Image (tube, grey):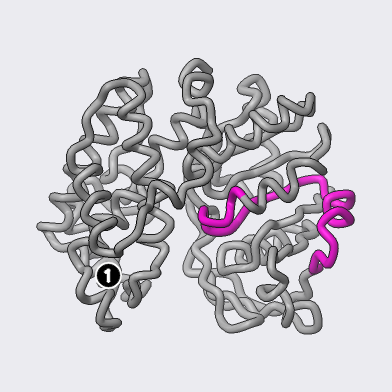
Amino acid sequence: MPRRVLILGAGGVARGMAALLHSLGHEPMLWSPSGQGTRALASQPLQVTGALAGTLRVAIAQDLATALDWAEVVVLAMPANGHRAALDAVLPRLRADHTIIISAQLSLGGFYVHQALTARGVSALVMAWGTTVVLGRALGADGVQIGGLRRRVEVAALPVARADEALALCQTLFGDRFAKAPTLLAIALGNLNPPVHMANALCNLTRIERGEVWANYDGITPAVARLIKGLDAERLALAAAFGLSVRSVERHFRETFALPDALSLAQMAARIHADRGGPPGPTDLSTRFITEDLPFGILEIITLAQHVGQVTPLHTAGFTLFQSLCGRDFCAENTLLPAIDLGAVVAM
């Protein structure tokens, strides 16, 4: 049976999800907070290239309240910088029969939703994903290039008792590519993007600042890989302090890109670059590698570590360096973590 899915966002991931949902027989609708991202798509089809290809007409939400009345599932698919504002716009209108998916969760956004709905007495199913299901890049005003569909995405649910229902719905909507994670905290500590992106951006910073043309995975040299593994050791130790077991960065690369066990992290990055060439590395300091992953990913790790008395010297050093390099207060930019009861998260 086709499902009605409202996607909050209009960038590459949101457009790619719309294409995937359409290919599997569902009814996606895109909502842009500003309206800019969907203006062209209101009158012309979405042009899809890459792992999926074709053209399709996507429904566009002109009024959020009307769109929420129509939707069965609501998916948040935008950079974390916009999560708080988008969630605050929809939370007063969410119903118990809605399902809310955070794709992907940063700064415990799934718990923020659950916390707010519980305060309203609304028992909706909330899901948090560890990463996005599509690798999508917006092309102009009406296109998307899908670099790939992930083979494995971890999902956690609140209430935890509805985990099987959450898994089944994800598979119905997006295909058989999901695995259950025990808690939203496991999702938070299993997210590899922030440390990998921080290490790669830090070690290739002048390339980014000068706008040079470079390949993302080609930038993960053996030295960069050592830094990534050092960050990974801190993340794995923090997960263990919470009684959780999460994937290592090497396992993440192997499972995402179907690579053999014998390769080191640097060798895997070199293989990905040789096989794919892209994606290109960022060419501006406003890249989400910095402006999203630092305040919403790295700060999340540091904050959770402080909560249980753990030390994360590499995460903390990288965070401090980037605040100085960019001249920004990334702590002040995170509007989700201050609103979350960490004690309640840990107790779940």
**In which quadrant of the rendered view does residue 218 lie?**
bottom left
Q: Position of residue 162 (x, y in %)?
A: 67, 25
The total number of labels drawn is 1
Residue 246 visible in the snapshot:
yes
Q: Is residue 224 left or right of residue 125?
A: left
Residue in the foreground of this view, choosing between 37 and 14: 37
Q: Which residue is found at the position 63% from the left and 60% from the top?
A: 17
The answer to whether residue 152 is seen in the rendering is no
Quadrant of the rendered structure where residue 52 is?
Answer: bottom right
- What residue is rendered at 75% in x and 32% in y? 124
Taking the magenta stretch, the answer to whether it contains residue 63 is: yes
Outermost left residue = 223
Left or right: where does residue 35 sit relative to residue 280? right
Residue 301 in the image, given as x and y percentages of width and height: 35, 37
Q: x, y (%) of residue 337?
A: 48, 38
Packing grade of label 1 (10 A; few <14, some 14-19, many >=20) is some
Q: Secondary structure at mark 1?
A: helix
Task: Indicate left or right for 82 with 223 as reference.
Answer: right
**Image check: 289 left or right of 99?**
left
The residue lying at 28 percent from left, 35 percent from top is 235
- For disc 1, the marked residue is 273
In the displayed orientation, state which residue is furthest to the top. 347
Q: Name the spot of residue 326 as percent of width and height, x first.
A: 30, 64
- Which stretch did the figure color magenta? 59-84
